[in-house]
Image (spheres, helix red, strand yellow):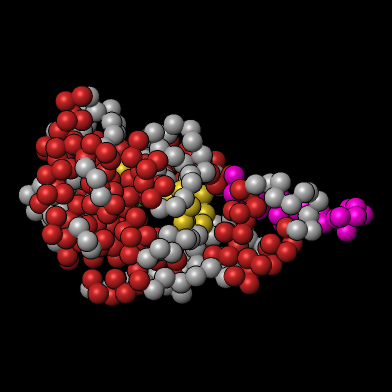
């Protein structure tokens, strides 16, 4: 099975409105085995739910994480010229080089997780348009980025972890969240990679200007993604759609990756059922966004790095959940009456 591609917005919208579902028969089998294991019912807490989630989407009663893929999508943003970031856009290029040289946090965390790491430079790192003046992407560019993200997913993966790199993208994440769920820049913006008070004022103003510029399309989640999003965010959207098509569960990172795929939830209440959120970002808007999506992040370590770091950090936890389910003895095995 190969990843899907989209020829136009209608095809993309159709895929978003008709998501596939987890295998309920597999989930029932996992639940039944769990009830026989040598522990009180529910005593492993969220580890039990994670095992059901992994198995149901992998369509395997004994889920596995033999092949985990981490993808970092990198892109630049036109709104950086408005002074919303403490860092210049050239840092995106330098960090991509750092990824390739093995020197970033995600390199270490993906290695610890036993995961492969792919880095995808979107649109040659050329910036999007300034979304206060025009759509961040035209339709052709948006679709191209979605399809690039979809094509980056390894069909043989047991789990996909998605992350990003892009100076200014916490401003874009806040704009996406506000565009999808309402509110103003003040309600969704945070310090990102170290914004001072003056930068925060500019960030809030830019978000509000973008919302005002594109107010006519805020009732269409895909138009919000195109007009207020970024190249790397469109790619994450495509990767997450492709993963569902390929029966691959997805671990999201923090604020940016969650905002990037939030249009799937806005389009369909079950659109992100195959995803879990790895950690609760220190960006204040992420807690609010996670609640809007009806989810609870797995970790809360005060991370705000991006790169997929929080998603990769969760992989050993998932391995522990699988090891308990697949390896524990049943009460009968242990000669214990339950």
Q: Is residue 247 left or right of residue 196?
A: right
Q: Nearer the viewer, residue 242 or 1?
A: 242
Above or below, 197 against 259 in this view is: above
Residue 163, image x and y in percent?
Answer: 38, 47
Query: Residue 225: in sight, yes or no?
Result: yes
Magenta span: predominant SS is helix
Residue at position x 55%, y 57% from top? 67
Residue at position x 36%, y 46% from top? 289
Q: Nearer the viewer, residue 54 or 203?
A: 203
Residue 191, image x and y in percent?
Answer: 28, 31
Find residue 62 and report its image quarter: bottom right
Q: Is residue 274 left or right of residue 176?
A: right
Q: Quadrant of the C terminus?
A: bottom right
**Numbered-mark total:** 0
Find residue 221 and report its image quarter: bottom left
**Image: magenta residue range:** 317-338
Residue at position x 35%, y 56% from top? 261
Residue 270, image x and y in percent?
Answer: 43, 64
Query: Residue 7: in sight, yes or no?
Result: no
**Residue extending furthest toward the left:** 133
**Residue extending furthest toward the front:** 183
Queried whether the magenta region covers residue 327, the answer comes back as yes
Above or below, 314 against 17 in this view is: above
Residue at position x 17%, y 56% from top? 227
């Amino acid at each position: 099975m190969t990843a899907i591609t989209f020829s136009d917005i209608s095809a993309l919208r159709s895929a978003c409105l008709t998501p596939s579902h987890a295998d309920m028969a597999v989930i029932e089998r996992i639940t039944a085995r769990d009830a026989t294991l040598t522990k009180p019912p529910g005593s492993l807490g969220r580890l039990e739910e994670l095992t059901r989630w992994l198995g149901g989407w992998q369509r395997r009663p004994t889920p596995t994480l033999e092949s985990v893929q981490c993808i970092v999508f990198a892109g630049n943003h036109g709104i950086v010229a408005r002074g919303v970031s403490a860092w210049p856009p050239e840092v995106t290029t330098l960090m991509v080089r750092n990824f390739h040289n093995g020197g970033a946090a995600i390199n270490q965390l993906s290695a610890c997780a036993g995961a492969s790491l792919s880095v995808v430079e979107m649109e040659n790192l050329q910036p999007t348009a300034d979304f206060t003046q025009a759509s961040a992407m035209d339709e052709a560019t948006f679709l191209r980025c979605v399809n690039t993200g979809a094509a980056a997913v390894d069909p043989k993966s047991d789990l996909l972890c998605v992350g990003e790199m892009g100076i200014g993208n916490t401003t874009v994440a806040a704009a996406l969240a506000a565009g999808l769920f309402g509110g103003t820049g003040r309600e969704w913006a945070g310090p990102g990679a170290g914004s001072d008070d003056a930068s925060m004022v500019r960030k809030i103003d830019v978000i509000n200007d973008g919302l005002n510029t594109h107010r006519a399309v805020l009732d269409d989640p895909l138009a919000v993604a195109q007009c207020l999003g970024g190249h790397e965010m469109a790619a994450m959207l495509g990767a997450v759609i492709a993963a569902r098509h390929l029966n691959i569960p997805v671990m999201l990172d923090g604020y940016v990756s969650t905002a990037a795929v939030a249009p799937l939830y806005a389009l369909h209440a079950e659109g992100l059922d195959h995803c879990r959120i790895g950690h609760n970002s220190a960006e204040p808007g992420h807690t609010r966004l996670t609640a809007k999506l009806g989810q609870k992040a797995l970790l809360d370590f005060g991370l705000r790095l991006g790169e997929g770091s929080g998603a990769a950090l969760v992989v050993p936890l998932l391995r522990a959940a699988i090891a308990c389910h697949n390896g524990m003895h049943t009460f009968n095995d242990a000669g214990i009456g339950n």
